[in-house]
Amino acid sequence: MGDPMAELACPEPPDGGWGWMVVLAGFLQSALVFGVIRSFGVFFMEFVGYFGELAGRVSWVTSIGISVQQLGGPVGSALSTQYGARPVVMAGGVLSGLGMFLASFATSLTHLYLSIGLLSGLGWALVFTPSVASVARYFGKRRAFATGLAVSGAGLASFAFSPLFQLLVDTYAWRGALLVVAGISFNLVAAGALLRPLELEGNKASVPEAGWLQLLAFSSFCRPRLACHRPFLLFSAAFILVDAGYYVPYVHLVPHARELGFDEYRAAFLLSSAAVADLCGRVVGGWLADRFAIRLVHSLTLWTVLTGFSMMLVPLGQSYSLLMGLCICYGFFAGALVPLQFSGLAEIVGTGHIMEGIGLMQMLESAGSLVGAPLSGWLRDMTGDYTASFIVAGTFLLAGSLLLFALPNYFSCPMDSTTEEETRGDP
């Protein structure tokens, strides 16, 4: 009987088999990366009160972490191409847990910027890109559905983590709570161990065997076929705008609810409800994309528009029931677009270049993630509430959806064969 951890060689994506274990690994990593990120709003009020800083400055803690996670995407891609996804993801799990552990000893916001923002953010970068790319390599026909299952862990974890983190803060204070979060994050090491290498015939690793210096130079990401390819750059630019607004509710929804007079547990439950809707949206969005003969980019545009409008309506929720309904709508729409983003990217760059594509796209997206939450916090400090923050965040998503219309052959039914041929060819 063969070693289940040994490398597989297949002529095409197996669409099953060990691929479901890879989906489980992706589910765990999305839970332990984005579930933590999305529930960090619980710590926001604690940091504001303890350090006595404005919301805009505290917002940088989460924002730096998200942007480093995305900016480091090419690092995770290049290292995975050179050494395999498994050791890279396991190393990322160690870094993410270590960053949370060191954050529990912070005496200033700068310490949190470095520990959570830089160290944990780098760990998340090493975890996320290789995990999602591994799912894309194992699945072809059912790629959108498999990706939806893999990334749905963020929704389930957010549902559990928001009230859990609030309970930990009430029981152990924020320092003790961060120690527990660190222990949870170290489980990413076990998730990484499930990533069995898969080599597809005709899609050999494209990073040249030229040593460590060439690896650091990201030579595989500087090729004109990808880094200068117009459809890929338009797609990435759209998600720079989307990311500028996408994460705002996960940072400022709890503080917004607290300012409306709801207690901390009711405020945290809003995030949990949005997380359950997010989980459903990811699975349903991926399933619908595979079930019906609709181009992925068209479905992606629809979900992005709905996410933007639902976010702009959040300030109208002055009663708890109405705010809950708006949060559920936002969570479902925001979840549905996630698997379509990565499945759509696979259509644009081809399965053989999915690792590089995700890494480079994540790096470009980091610009939007970096400014989104701090801008939202700054608007709160200037206006006295979060109304303008949510409206501006929703506007960013609508602007991103408009850029998707500029993709080649967007209004034609078949896929852009020219684009597919160009991007799937050998570099």
Image (cartoon, rainbow, N blue to C red):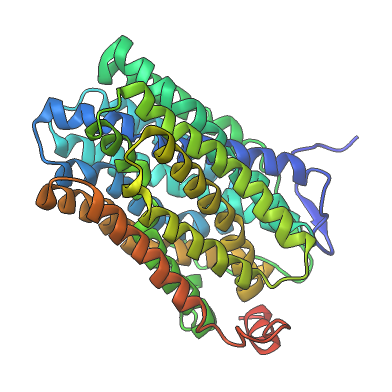
Where is residue 400? Give x, y as percent. 42, 70
Q: From the image, which quarter does the N terminus lie in?
A: top right
* Residue drawn at 32 percent across, 10 percent down: 171
- Of the pair 325 and 267, the residue shown nearer to us: 325
Where is residue 124? Give x, y as percent. 44, 44
Q: Quadrant of residue 82?
A: bottom right
* Residue drawn at 33 percent across, 62 percent down: 368
Q: In this view, does 115 lie to the left or right of 427?
A: left
Q: In which quarter of the image is residue 111?
A: top left
- Of the pair 398 and 19, the residue shown nearer to us: 398
Q: In this view, does 126 lie to the left or right of 84?
A: left
* Residue drawn at 28 percent across, 49 percent down: 64
* Residue drawn at 23 percent across, 56 percent down: 388
Check the image and name the residue furthest to the right.
Answer: 1
Q: In this view, does 402 lie above or below 32?
A: below
Where is residue 167? Give x, y as percent. 37, 16
- Of the pair 110 and 43, the residue shown nearer to us: 43
Q: Is residue 133 left or right of residue 401?
A: right
Where is residue 251? Give x, y as percent. 32, 42
Q: In this view, does 202 lie above or below 35?
A: below
